[in-house]
Image: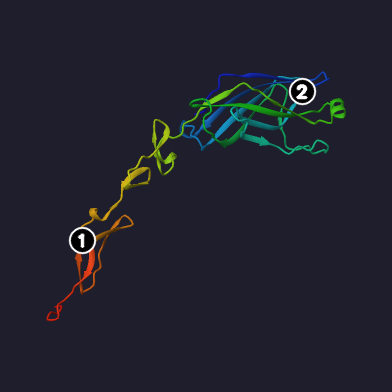
Amino acid sequence: MVKRKFIIIIAVLFLINIGIVNAYFYSITHKCENDNCIEGHDAIWYVTIHNEGSHLVEFTAIEIINSFNDSTIAEIKLPFKPLTSDRGDLIKVGQYKKVIVNLTGSIPSSNNQKELNYYPCFTNTITDNFFIAKYKKYEDRHCYYVNESMVVLQCVSNKNCGNDEYCTINKCKKLDCGQCQYFEEHQCIDYECCNTEQCGFGELCNNNTCQKLNCGVNEYIENRTCKKLLCGFDEYIV
């Protein structure tokens, strides 16, 4: 299911010193696997662009930017060759038309409690020859600092957490294992032993495992160690 956004922004770009106005609406929705947007997993952002201007609008890039640190979450950037006849396979939106662009990226951690706030940036082409000749500029990048948001979870099950963590209330928590325990598959497991007293008679604790003492034929076990049998001058071992 696609998560709907409630804000639709009118984006109007006034190009400097020229009478042409590029006017377009945009809206953004997103989709996550099983409707759960989990940190580190992929999401798809659907950017819908409606052209309400007086001429064709072309885009060379669309970006989804993290509002907290301005890092790029997802983007599409297309090769643009403004000085050739083949200018590139750009995103073109005709007058009174709409285009939907899909962007895929890894979901970062939330930056506003349980929500991830982000904003979009658009780079469109400039086709006015006077403007190009005066400013030597062929593209215009504009960001709209109106936060979009999505709920981001750390986990929905233990498999979304580290091996030494477990999932509780959609957050990964560190396991608090005892001194004689180790973690495996998101749980604390007891070692077989941590000292020799935990082993049976004739065994020794080595690397947290009870191992049998391997005494020789002329040895006996005392206090969990092998000791030599000492015979008198008139005795022998049988």
Mark whose residue sits in front, 2 or 1: 1
The three-letter amino acid code for the residue at tag 2 is His
Q: Where does the image place residue 85, in percent across and percent down from the top left?
A: 82, 38
Q: Where does the image place residue 44, in percent across and percent down from the top left?
A: 56, 33
Q: Check the image and report above or below for 176 versus 116.
A: below
The three-letter amino acid code for the residue at tag 1 is Asn
Residue at image mark 2: 55
Q: Where does the image place residue 79, in percent across and percent down from the top left?
A: 73, 39
Residue at image mark 1: 223
Q: In the displayed image of the protein, which residue is found farthest to the front? A: 233
Q: Where does the image place residue 180, in percent across and percent down from the top left?
A: 31, 48
Task: Quadrant for residue 10, please give it.
Answer: top right
Give the residue at x 81% y 30%: 137
Q: In the displayed image of the protein, which residue is found farthest to the left? A: 234
Q: Secondary structure at mark 1?
A: loop
Q: Looking at this view, is 167 or 48 the one in front? A: 167
Q: Check the image and report above or below for 200 versus 103.
A: below
C-alpha gap between disc 2 and disc 1: 94 Å
Q: Secondary structure at mark 2?
A: loop
Q: Looking at this view, is 185 or 1 the one in front? A: 185
> In this image, 201 relative to 173: left or right?
left
**Who comes first in sequence, dot 2 or dot 1?**
2
Q: In the displayed image of the protein, which residue is found farthest to the bottom? A: 234
> In this image, 56 relative to 189: left or right?
right
Count how many numbered circles sit on residues in the image. Answer: 2
- Dividing the image into 4 quarters, which one contains the C terminus? bottom left
| Crowd tier of the residue under label 1, counting other residues whose Cα lies within 10 Å: few below 14, some 14–19, many 20 or above | few
* Colouring scheme applied when the structure was drawn: rainbow
The reply to whether discs 2 and 1 touch (Cβ–Cβ < 8 Å) is no
Q: Looking at this view, is 16 or 127 the one in front? A: 16
Task: Quadrant for residue 25, please give it.
Answer: top right
